Image (tube, rainbow, N blue to C red):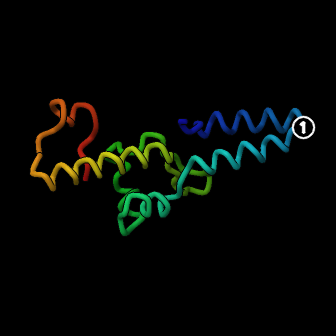
Amino acid sequence: MSAISPALLNDVTAALRDAGRSDLVERLMASAKADTLTSTQAAALLGVASANTVKNWLDGGYFPGAFQTPGGHWRFSREDVESVKMRMEELRARNRHGDLMPVGGDEDSVHPPLP
């Protein structure tokens, strides 16, 4: 499941509020929060020591679903974070076995290089 964009989430919640369905707004917001992670949660899931590390990886294009809240805090798509984690684990496993060649050709053409 992919995360809903912040703009679409705002539009949908406004429409639901206008329709008098605050109960659905609460359910939608709870669901959206379940599919997003704070930078600290993303760092923990990725096994890195600092939330700043995760924020620095934004410039590398690792988290295309990331967005800032109105308060300026970053939120990361759980799907994006889990995808990066899987790629990191695959690369670590290949490195342990001495296989440093990209699988299926030039990995940089498909994904940005991992830090």
Image-based side of 54 in relation to 28, left or right: left
In the rendered image, residue 68, in percent from the top left (x then y), is placed at 54, 50
Residue nearest the viewer, comparing 80 with 101 = 101
Residue nearest the viewer, comparing 98 with 69 = 98
Residue nearest the viewer, comparing 70 with 105 = 105
Rendered residue at 23%/44% (across/down): 113
Q: Residue furthest front?
A: 97
- Above-or-below relation of 12 to 31: above
The part of the image, by quadrant, that contains residue 110 is top left
Q: Residue furthest right?
A: 20
In the rendered image, residue 99, in percent from the top left (x then y), is placed at 11, 46
Label count reads 1
- Above-or-below relation of 60 to 54: above
Q: Mark 1: give few (<14), some (14-19) or many (20+) Cα within 10 Å.
A: few
Rendered residue at 56%/49% (across/down): 36
Rendered residue at 22%/31% (across/down): 109
In the rendered image, residue 15, in percent from the top left (x then y), is placed at 79, 32
Image-based side of 110 in relation to 30, left or right: left
Q: Residue furthest bottom?
A: 49
Residue at the spot of label 1: 20
- Above-or-below relation of 4 to 87: above
Image-based side of 61 in relation to 15, left or right: left
Query: Quarter holding the N terminus?
Result: top right
Rendered residue at 42%/61% (across/down): 43
In the rendered image, residue 84, in percent from the top left (x then y), is placed at 36, 47
Q: Secondary structure at mark 1?
A: loop
Residue flagged by tag 1: what amino acid is it? Gly
Residue nearest the viewer, comparing 65 with 107 = 107
